[in-house]
Image: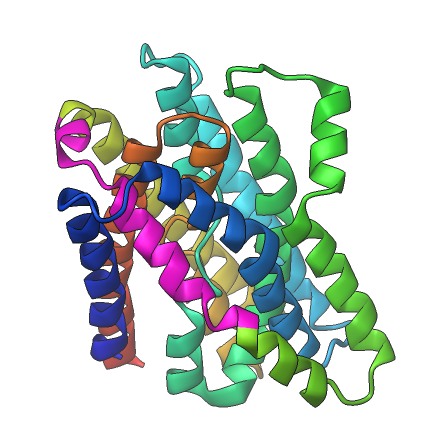
Amino acid sequence: MIYKILSYLVIIAIGYFLKSINFLNETEGRAFSKIVIYITLPAVIIQAVTSVKLTLPLFSLTAFGILTTLTLMIAGFLIFRRSNAARGTKGSLILTFNGLNLGLFAYPFAQLLWGGKGLAYMSIFDMGNGLMIYTVGYAIAILFSEDGFSTKEVIKKVSTFPPLLAIFGAIILNLSLSNADILSEFLGIFSGANAFLSLLTIGIFLNFERLRVEFRNMAKAISFKYLIGAALGVTFYFVLRIFEPSNALMAQVVLLSALMPAPLLTLLYSIDKKLDPELAGGTVTTTVIVSSIFLLCFGGIV
């Protein structure tokens, strides 16, 4: 598992290095982010959801995913809504609370630690997490963009947002297909590029001088994200242990998921809506490092 985490950090470093020697620049980074949002991320979503057998009892995990992410978002908004930071910077700080990076970051660990069953549980939790990221999170990005908030525009953009359409399409496919192996193999061509392009984009937008200037705000956002995430994870862990005493795995998955890093869409939204991509790249990278420590500790305990 440690090699997987190190490989993520190496790809981020490669992106930063290629930018520093002017081989890549932020214009190309924006192009990569569009490829992720419109092609590779939807492929990852469809592939993950169609690989899980959906049953009604398991949708309680989806509800926990919604509650966890929505609570984080509301907390982030309340903490930074009166900040003196620039509008775009404020938006990127709030987006630090924009859900959890499970698909790219935590899925490999879940499969390694718990096997297919643990991965399935995390995927179903991630459906709720993703639903909030692709709706409420995107609306927050629009709210702090230069264009400002327009209810009509938000509804239009959210309802046509590719990752959200991918979730609904994946659920339909899951319930209608008896064998998704062929579809999964086809989507694997696209989804295989998602991690590399996403992490490379983080490196391209990493700006240490910008992070030094905004260190206090960034540290505040990250600290509150993990404190609130830990509180939610522990609370939901004990709720599940009370109501599902025979299924400790489900509770463990929810606890670990609540401690995962800020999603890559924190950066991609910041790029798309011209918020503060350099700050967003820094917060995503820092939370990847912090959550890596949690993963290694959790693996040692479990």
Residue situated in front as seen by the camera: 137 or 153: 153
Which residue is found at the position 54% from the left and 62% from the top? 40
Q: What's the residue at 57%, 53% (across, down)? A: 129
Residue 75 screen position, x and y as percent: 46, 32
* Magenta part of the chain: 190-212
Instruction: Give coordinates of residue 262: x percent, y percent.
Output: 39, 48
Q: Is residue 225 left or right of residue 159?
A: left
- Magenta segment main secondary structure: helix
Q: Nearer the viewer, residue 271 or 84?
A: 271
Question: Is residue 19 visible from the viewing direction of this image?
Answer: yes
Left-right relation of 153 to 296: right
Give the farthest residue toward the right.
176
Q: Locate the C terminus and report the quarter of the image it occupies.
A: bottom left
Q: Is residue 14 above or below residue 220?
A: below
Q: Quadrant of residue 260?
A: bottom left
Q: Quadrant of the N terminus?
A: bottom left
Q: Is residue 244 visible?
A: no
Identify which residue, 11 or 169, lies in the foreground: 11
Position in image of residue 266 (x %, y %): 43, 41
Residue placed at 77% from the left, 22% from the top?
152
Q: Residue 111: x and y, percent?
A: 44, 83
Please give the count of numbered marks on the rendered protein. Answer: 0
Q: Residue at x 76, y 31 (%)?
A: 156
- Rendering colour mode: rainbow
- Is residue 223 located in the magenta-colored stretch of the structure? no
Query: Considering depth in this image, is 209 or 172 the residue closer to the camera?
Result: 209
Q: Is residue 195 magenta?
A: yes
Q: Residue furthest front?
A: 23
